[in-house]
Amino acid sequence: MSCSAQTPCVQKQDQQQDQQVYTSVKDYYGKVLQTTNDLKTSACTGSSKPHPIVCRLLRTLPQAVTDKFYGCGNPLPLGITGKDVLDLGSGSGRDCYVAAALVGPQGSVTGVDMTDEQLQTARENIDAFGQTLGYQPNLKFLTGYIEALEDAGVANESKDICISNCVVNLSPNKPQVLAGVYTALRSGGEFHFSDMYSDRTVPESVRQHEELHGEGLTGALFANEFERIVKKIGFVSPRVLSIRHISIFDEQFKQLVGDTNYFSITYRLFKVRSAIGEADCTATYLGTVEGHEERYLLDIDNSFDTNVPRRVSANTATILKESWLAKYFAVESVVDNNSDSQTIAAKRTPSECLMKSALQAECSSSALKSCSK
């Protein structure tokens, strides 16, 4: 029987292609890479410095866990004591270990990964870390695929926060990953994650390169396409928390990618209702997130000084009223349009503008370093 017009055959072909991707990623992160020194781009080594609280916790982690860390950002929100956290593509467990300390003995952290070598490292160091903490953390690692969280053992609507560090780009089915996260989150939950994005559609010649896939470049989503996907799934008003241009060290890689620029972006996606059309509000940050006593950065466009009312858009107000952040903010409807409260622009800065700014900033920095030699 010919497969050319048969849906089951098309599905089988897709499954085979997905399995090839899984095998490639497993080999690259389980066998090819031994430490971060083996990487050929800055994707997993050049992220900005984490918050001092996170830096302090990183210094307490087992060396084996940190040596095999291949993330591209710092997707670890503070103020998550007692929360249930899920980490997609948890690898050696670095972010999970830090999250376990942040949530404390009343919270929980679950990592999901498909690479046996990474999972072994993550699991065998839990007891030692518990001795460092002074209590046994509610920390576990599940073997599975991030496209099938329920099959891996993650119950629907069971998590408050989902994090991920440079892993979604490796998936052959990103919409399925994002939809699975949405299902796993409770109402008011957040997907707080760092990943790789491009400023244009990645050429097919790049997508077929196995090593480039391992480094994350072939699977990088065009940022505009990513935002369309998450809005369709149900996440409200995607927020950019940080953005950084990714440098490519390998000369062959540079020639292959051509004019395509890559960026590490930390996004915040909230599972709350859409508030389009509702009245604007004021939001006051209470200063109660440990580590952010004076100021809280929701995203690049929304920064809140403690006890200073700020005018916010309807969607921002909904996020601050209905998400896990609600206890840290006081939100009120705007009655007087001549209010003395400070104003935050209702419109978010487009991702393409943020990419251009990040690229220009790096070019200016490079020129400055060159002049100073």
Image: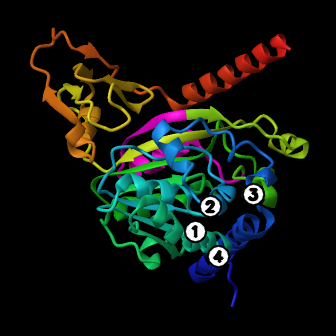
Q: Which residues are magenta?
A: 218-242
Q: Looking at this view, name the residue that lies furthest to the right.
A: 252
Earlier residue among tags 1 and 2: 2
Q: Secondary structure at mark 3?
A: loop
Q: Are marks 1 and 2 in contact (CB under 8 Å)?
A: yes
The answer to whether residue 275 shows anywhere in this view is no
- Asked whether residue 2 is drawn in magenta, I would say no
Front residue (pair 314, 249): 249
Picture layout, residue 293 above or below residue 19 = above
Residue where numbered disc 3 is placed = 35
Earlier residue among tags 2 and 3: 3
Front residue (pair 321, 315): 321
Check the picture and name the quadrant holding the N terminus.
bottom right
* Kind of residue sitting beneath label 2: Val
Q: Which mark lies nearer to you, 3 or 4? A: 3
* Kind of residue sitting beneath label 3: Thr
Check the picture and name the quadrant holding the C terminus.
top right
